[in-house]
Image (cartoon, coloured by chain):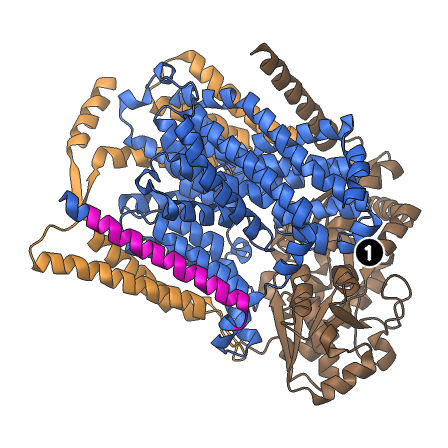
Chain colours: A orange, B brown, C blue
Amino acid sequence: MKDKMDRISARLREKQIRIPVDLTVGVVFFLVAAAVLLLMPSQVAISERDVVNGRAFPTLLMWVMMICCALLVGKEIYKIIKKRPIAYKTINLLVEVKALIIMAILVITYLLARTTDLFVVGAVFCAVAFLLYFRCKKPLYYVITVGMAVGIWAVFRFLLNVHF
Amino acid sequence: MKKRRICLCLALILAFSLMTGTVGFAAGETWTVTCPWAPDGVASLVSQKVAALSSEYSDDITLVAFAQKGDAATVNTWVLDNEAGDTGLVFVGEGLLSITSIMDPAKMQFDYDNFEFVENLYSSVFVLSADAKLDIKNIEDLQAYVADADEITVATNGATGSEAFLAAALFGSMGAGDALKIVPYQSAAEAAQGVVRGETQFAVSHQSQIEESFKQGGVTVVCAFDEDAIENGPFAGVEGVGQYDYPYFRNRCFIMAPAGTDEEKVAELKALYDEILADEEVVEWLHETMLLEVDTMDEEAVLEHVDNVKNIVNEYIDIVQPAA
Amino acid sequence: MLQHIIPASGLLFTLQNILWINIGVFIGAVFAAIPGLTVILCVILFLPVTYSMSAIPGMMFLLGIYCAGGYGGSVSAILINTPGTPHAAATMLDGHPMSKQGRTKAALKIALYASTFGGIFSALALLFLGPQVAKLAAQLGTPEYFMVCLFGLTIIAGVSGKSMIRGIIAACLGLLISCIGSDPMTSYDRFTFGINRLYLGLDLAVCLIGLFALVEIVSRAEDQPQEMHMDTRKMKDDGTITKDEYKRMVRPALLGSLIGVMVGIIPGTGASEASWFSYSQAKNMSKHKEEFGNGSVEGIAAAESANNAVTGATLIPLLTLGIPGDGTVAIMLSALMINGLNPGLSLFTTQGDIMYAIMLGLILVNVFMFIQGKLLTPLFAKVVSIPQEILTPIIVIFCFAGAYSVNKNYFDVAVALVFCVLAWILRKLDMPPVPILLGLVLGRMTETNFRRALLISNGSPKIFVSSVYCWAFIALIVLAVGTIIRGKIHDRKAQEKEE
């Protein structure tokens, strides 16, 4: 099992994606700003009597964001035309897969705590899941971490009166 | 190193005993009283004071005050989390039952039927204060000022709260609804400062919130939103708008249990609150420090209050917030 | 004043008061060191303890929590790159890099010294200048508040990293997120998408957990196995601070304390704003700008002295005018009012001894915070030697418990998770997270004061130049922008030289 995982890790470590980071930021946030502007009428009610209504500030922000995005994209296009190197960011697939696993642990911890309405269940899962993620083989670490998870829950539940 | 460890152990033991002794465990049945407004607000303060005395008056019930700012959202959560048999109480006032229910019913996932009325915690008479430079000292001065004013600005806590409707009702019934501009602030204390700085001409607030500015001479207190003149405290003698037939309501804070709570339990809770609210120390504190009144009520009076405020809201809603 | 000092000292120096100060300091420091458990939450939880006390011990206990909370937030910021409280976020920028260099104890000590300096500075300001300064601060109105916010937004330039454009985009995102919830001026909902819990807006502490703490956990994915099992015991960390470092701390600590006091006396602003203002100004004025963000002594000193200097300053408007300077102090008001003390200048005449005992007590609180801090520093420093396998899940559990405790519901935990995902994506796009935090801190205040000012002036922008205070803030903004531009030109020239 360990060998198999190591092999997969080694394979993933070699896989990398390069993204033109400034271009991506410019395009993504331009679209975000445009979407917010489109959503504005349905999400922010205003009245005729408002001197400065509730849409003014977010609208101003989104225009500033769009201008900044346009500048960022413009700068990169200029570099491409002038055949200068543009900014790239390298993303390693292994890192992203590992990040996804950690996020999954976080989400499952949350779901377990929420559905059972017992925070300690999620806490114990979280402790064990992270030890497994780190491939920990020391039983003492498991005892300490699970003990701490229960302890933290008990302090919040019984001393601080946080009922979860 | 040894000394350090001893100090640390001592501190831990002290902190632990403090928490277990005061926060964690209480004798008898513990009722958590949720205040859906600011932890430093008037309702929360009174709730804390009353809760602190509960163990002196009852061996069976301990009240624990808890404040969670959030208004309708907090009460929505409370209604979802508490059902008959649970030991939770919550405050609701005319702001939720009479104002939000008309202005923004979608915000509320509850109505009066979700509760069993226990008691009214206090009554507060709001006052209208004016920038001292305007030299408006009573309702006659106010009427004269309003008659000539092109614009009337009033500082209130929030845009659509009780204070905003009291301002709308007073100036609206004086025929100056169109000239009225409500300037909302984030808190009552901030609103009171707004008028002191001259940002607005008037402010509506609890008496205690304007007391210091009044003592410093920054504002004059024009009138009280009540039937008659104020009898006690630093504002004794200030006229009530009711004397001139202008609409008004008092601010009240109803303590509610979950719908379906055992009648005997409700009666027991009401009796406990009544006893604490009759305590001389509490009465004096409410009068002298908080400038509030003890005003125990029955359910009929509560419904009457809710309807009265609803009528005022319906009449003056266009002044406070024109249709979106 | 002098006639009150001796009787006030008699009231203050009792065994009971000293005991309560120490309990408060200990609880405050530990609470604030845990991500998600904010000082305000701690004060709310322990307020009932003061019900049975008289005014002085009650206030001493709460002040102990408040002041130590100012320092405690820096502990986790330094140790685990996660600010325990929002106002320790600026400390994180240099505190954690210094800890990574194997100087954890030194970073903790610098934070403690700066915090104590800032705390005592503001306590003295409260004692000697309280009423006068409060009257001045009370004259700042809505347009001046907007100017303060605008000045605050200039900090974005200093925390944007390599690209100011990306910093501005991130700040816009933060400011937009601050718009979620009820419109402060009309009560209409904005960007709530029908979700009930969003009516209240998003809690800063919850966003902070996602943006900094949880994303730090996800970033463990970037660690190499050998980094994970790094034996920190082999690192030499004797906590030594050199003479030169002490010297370099003085100017930013003094500047931070001044900024902290100035920000603290303006009701509605708080320690977060103060620490960012101070950090940014210290960076602009420093001869070692390049060290900022890489473990600068000046950076830690500036941020920590400022957030603790706020503690005494927020009490100035509270005790003299009855206006609480920030949320935590507003709750402390309860401890006074429950004891029948309605704060205001008149109370200095009627209950002068009690008022001066409280003000003197603040100095004592800072002294005990220093003593406890010195005792606890070696213990705190040991956190970095806890194996990652154990530390990581414990941080997550504390974060989740902290997020839940803010409003006692799981919705906030979900919000923290969403912010974690957002922060991870932004990290991948090289977007700085600090401007988002700044946007969140300043957003509501900026918008509310901008709109209210225009409402008062019937839409005329002249209101923003209507007072001498406005002009003073405009001058400050011009100065800040000028310094930024000068710095950028200098950086570019240096870069060109290198090339």
Residue B313: name its quadrant: bottom right
> With C39 as the anchor, is A29 left or right in this view?
left
Determine whether A45 is above or below A7 in the image. Answer: below
Q: Nearer the viewer, residue A12 or C60?
A: C60
Task: Residue lying at the far front in this picture: please name it.
Answer: C2
Q: Amino acid at mark 1?
A: Asn
Residue position marked by numbered label 1 in the rendering: B120
x and y, in percent, of residue C330 in the image: 67, 49
Q: In terms of secondary structure, what is the magenta stretch mainly?
A: helix
B113 on left or right of C194: right
**Numbered circles on residues, count:** 1
Depicted B199 relative to depicted C495: above or below: below
Q: Tag 1, which chain?
A: B
Extreme residue in the top direction: B2
Q: In the figure, is residue A84 to the left or right of C309?
A: left
Q: Which residues are magenta?
A: C466-494
Residue A60 picture quarter? bottom left
Q: Is residue C470 magenta?
A: yes
Please tell me which residue is depicted at 75% across the width and 71% down the height of the picture: B129
Q: Can the viewer see residue C194?
A: no
As helix, strand or loop, the secondary structure at mark 1 comes to strand
Residue B213 seen: yes
User: Foreground: B318 or B12?
Assistant: B12
Q: Position of residue A149 (x, y in %)?
A: 51, 25
Q: Badge 1: few (under 14), some or many (20 or more) residues near its Cα, within 10 Å?
A: many
In percent of the image, x 29 and y 56: which residue is there? Answer: C165
